[in-house]
Image: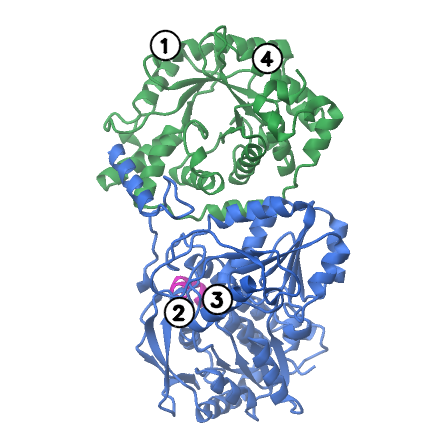
Amino acid sequence: MSTVAANAPGAAGGGLQDVAASEASLRRFLHGLPGVDAVGLEARAATLGTRSIKTTAKAYAIDLAISMIDLTTLEGADTFGKVRALCTKGRNPDPTDPTAPRVAAICVYPDMVATAKAALAGTDIQVASVATAFPAGRAALPVKLADTADAVAAGANEIDMVIDRGAFLSGRYLDVFNEITAVKQACKRADGTSAHLKVIFETGELQTYDNVRRASWLAMLAGADFIKTSTGKVAVNATPPVTLLMLEAVRDFKQQTGIQIGVKPAGGIKTTKDAMKYLVMVNETLGDDWLSPHWFRFGASSLLNDLLMQRQKLTTGRYSGPDYVTVD
Amino acid sequence: MAKNKQAENKQAQNQQAEAPKGGLFTYAPAPESPAAAGEIATSYGHFIGGEFVDSSGSEALKTVNPATEQVLAEFAQGTDEDVERAVTAARKAFTDWSALPGSERAKYLFRIARIIQERSRELAVLESIDNGKPIRETRDVDLPLVAAHFFYYAGWADKLDFAGYGANPKPLGVAGQVIPWNFPLLMLAWKIAPALATGNTVVLKPAETTPLTALRFAEICRQAGLPKGVVNIVTGDGRTGAALTAHPDVNKVAFTGSTPVGRSIARQLAGSRKKLSLELGGKAANIVFDDAPIDQAVEGIVNGIFFNQGHVCCAGSRLLVQESIQDELLDALKRRMGTLRVGDPLDKNTDIGAINSAAQLARITELSAAGEAEGAERWAPECELPGAGYWFRPTLFTGVSQAHRIAREEIFGPVLSVLTFRTPTEAVEKANNTPYGLSAGIWTEKGSRILWMANQLKAGVVWANTFNKFDPTSPFGGYKESGYGREGGRHGLEAYLDV
C-alpha cells in the first residue's frame, strides 16, 4: 500500500514507484523538486492577469466558467431546504435565460449529500462532499474514513478531503501520503467504481510556495484526482500565484507519469474578472486539455451571480443588477 | 445562444488553426485606439529655445509605423546650422537654469513627471505606433519608468551636496545627447532627467526611426513651463548626431547606441575637454544552474530575450544552461515560446510586436542565417505573422558554441543562442568570453553561488533569479565594449557634474 505503483498504476512509467517507500525517500523526492522563486511566480501570475478578454472570448469564458463551478454551501446553518434551493439554482442558474449552462457540481457537507442527490436526479450535475472532518481535519483517521464512506454511500460523486496540515508542516509526509491513500480507498463503492477524490491543501496555512509544490506532488503521488487550494474557511484562500503553481505541478506530473490531474481553486473568487484571470492561467499554462469541467473547477458560491450578470450584459447590452439574478 | 458562441469560437479556432496557442479559448482582439496617441502632424521641425521651429535645411526624413509600414510623419534632417541654433539656445539658458536653487529645478522636474503620468496613455500609444513595441510594454513598463526617472532625479536636485561628490558640485554646461530607437522615451528620460537635475541644459537628438515621442515630450516641457532653451530637441540621422557631438560648445556628450558609433564618437572627442559617457551593445549571458527555480527561470529567459522584440542592449541573448538540465529546460522553454503572441502592437494581448525597421529586420535575418550556416540548430514556434510590416518569429538556436557568430555578435532581435556548461567556473569563463560586458543573469536557489558568480562576472548589471528589471535608483552601464559611465541612481549624477 505504501508505494505509488499500487495506487496510481500509470505512475509506473514515471520512475516514481519507490518514492513513497520510506519517509526518507519521500522527503528526498519532495525536497528535490525545483524551487519556487516567489517574486517571479507572483510576477507571472500578475502578467497573466492583464490579458484583455473581450467580446466572443468573454462570452465563451463566462459560459465555461459557469460550467466549471462547484456551487457551494458549507455553513453550520445549512438546512435541507437551503441545499434543495441551491440545487435548483445549479440546474437552472438563470431563470430568464435557459441557454445559461449548468454548474459542474453542488458541494455540501456529508449529511446533505442524500438531499442534494435527490434534488439533482436526472441531471449530470455532480454531488461533491467535503468529508474527512472538514475544514480543520482534526480527527482520528477512522473518523475521517467513516465520514468519507458515509458521504460516498449517500451518493456523493466527489469527495473533497483536507490534508493534515500539522503532519505536513512537521515534515511527516508519509503520514499525509498514507492518509490520502486510505481516503482514496474509502471512496470506493460497492460496485467497484470510485468517487473522485479532491485533495485540499489549505494553501494559506502551508505558507510557502515550496510547500505548495511539495503538497501538490505528494497528493498526486498518493492518487488524488484533483488538487484543491483551500477550504474557504481561513483568511487566505485561493490566490492566482498559488493556483498557477499548482497548474504547473499538474503539468509536470502529467509529463512525467502520463496521468492527468484536475485543479480547483476555492475561496474568495467572487467576480467574473477574477474567474477570467484563472481561465487565462489555465489556458496559457495547460491549454485545451484542462479547459473543461473535468479538469478545472471553481469552488465558489457568489461567483455564479456575477457571471450571470455579466452574461446578461453581453446578451442584452445593458447592465441589470443584483435583483435580476436569484439569491439561492 | 451558447451554441452560437461555441460555433463562433470554433470558427475562430479554424481560422487560426496553425497558431500554436490554438484552442477553443481564442482571445478576441483587444485593440487600443490609435486615436489615443493624439494628433500626429504631417511634418515636424525642431524644438529650439522653447519653440517649434522649421529646419534651416530642406531635407526631410519619414518615420513609419513598423507594424504597417505606413508613413506616420515627416521630420527634419537637422543641419549643422540647426545644431548651432540649438546649442546656442541651450548655452543661453544655462546661465539662469544652473543658477536656480536645486529645489526650484526640482519643481519643474516633478511637474514634468506628473504630466507624463497624466498623459501616459497618449504617450504609450504613440510610442507603440512609432516603435512597433507592444502596448502592454509601453503601458506597463516604459511609461511608468519614464515618470519614475523624472521623479527620482527631481528628488536629487536639491540634495546634490549629499551625493558624495563634495559640497556644491557644479554642472558641466550644455549636454549633447544622442539616443537610440529601442526605448525612445525611456532613454530620453535617462538622459534628460539627471542632466536637468544637476543644472545642465540639453540638446537631444532622438533616433531617426522614432522621433515622435521626443517631439511630444517637447510639448510637455512647454506645458510644464520649463524655461526656454533648457531642453532642445533636434531631429535627424547620424549626420545630425555627429554635428551635435562635434560641436565645440557642447561640454558633455552622452550616447546610447551601437558600439561602432560609440567608438567613432570616442575617437572624435579624444583630446577635447568634453566629458563622455557611452552605453553600447551587449551579449549577456543568462546562466541557469541545475538547482534553479525552473518555471521562473523559463519566464526570466523569455523576458530576457523576447522583451521588446529583443531590442534591448542588456538582453539575455546567450542562454548558458547546465548540461544536466538542458533537455528539461529546453522543452519547457519551447512550450512557453509556443504561447507567445506575435502581432499587432496595439492589441493589448500582444507579447511580441514589430521589428523597428527594415534595416534591423535584415540584420536579424542575416545573423540568423549565419547561425544555421555555421551548424546551429534553429527552432521557432509556428505562428502567423501579419502580411505588412517588419516581423520576426521568436527564435531559438541550440548547439551553439562560443565560436559561432550568433554567440559573439549582438543580434538585437528575438533570437536566443543556447550554450551549455558543466561547472560554475566554466559558466563564468564562457559568460565573460565576450567583447561586451553590460549585463548577466544567474538562476540558482543557492545564495552563496549567486554572490560568488556576481563577483566573477564582468558585467555592469548582474541579475539573480530575475532579468531585465530596471529601476531609477539602480545604476546601469557596462564594461569593455559595452561602454563607460553609469546612468541611473546616485552614480548617474556623476556624468553630469564637474567632479
x, y percentage for residue B199? Answer: 58, 80
Give yes or no for contact between labels 2 and 1 (Cβ–Cβ under 8 Å): no
Chain letter corresponding to the colour blue: B
Give yes or no for contact between labels 1 and 4 (Cβ–Cβ under 8 Å): no
Marks 1 and 4 sit apart, C-alpha to C-alpha, by: 24 Å
* Residue A196 seen anywhere in this rendered image of the structure: yes
Marks 1 and 3 sit apart, C-alpha to C-alpha, by: 66 Å
Locate residue A286 relative to residue A34 in the image: left or right.
Answer: left
Query: On the same chain: label 4 and label 2?
Result: no
State which tag comes first along the sequence, 1 or 4.
Answer: 1
Q: Nearer the viewer, mark 4 or mark 3?
A: 3
Residue behind mark 4: A144
Q: Quadrant of the N terminus of chain A?
A: top right
Marks 2 and 1 sit apart, C-alpha to C-alpha, by: 63 Å
Residue range highlighted in magenta: B114-125
Residue behind mark 1: A118
SS label for mark 2 = helix
Q: Residue A38 — which label?
A: none
Work out whether B209 lies above or below A147: below
Q: Nearer the viewer, mark 2 or mark 1?
A: 2
Q: Chain of mark 2?
A: B
- Chain A appears in which tint? green
Seen from the viewer's position, the closer of residues B214 and B350 is B350
x, y percentage for residue A117? Answer: 39, 12
SS label for mark 3 = helix
* Residue B104 seen anywhere in this rendered image of the structure: no
Residue B247 is drawn in which quadrant?
A: bottom right
Marks 4 and 3 sit apart, C-alpha to C-alpha, by: 64 Å
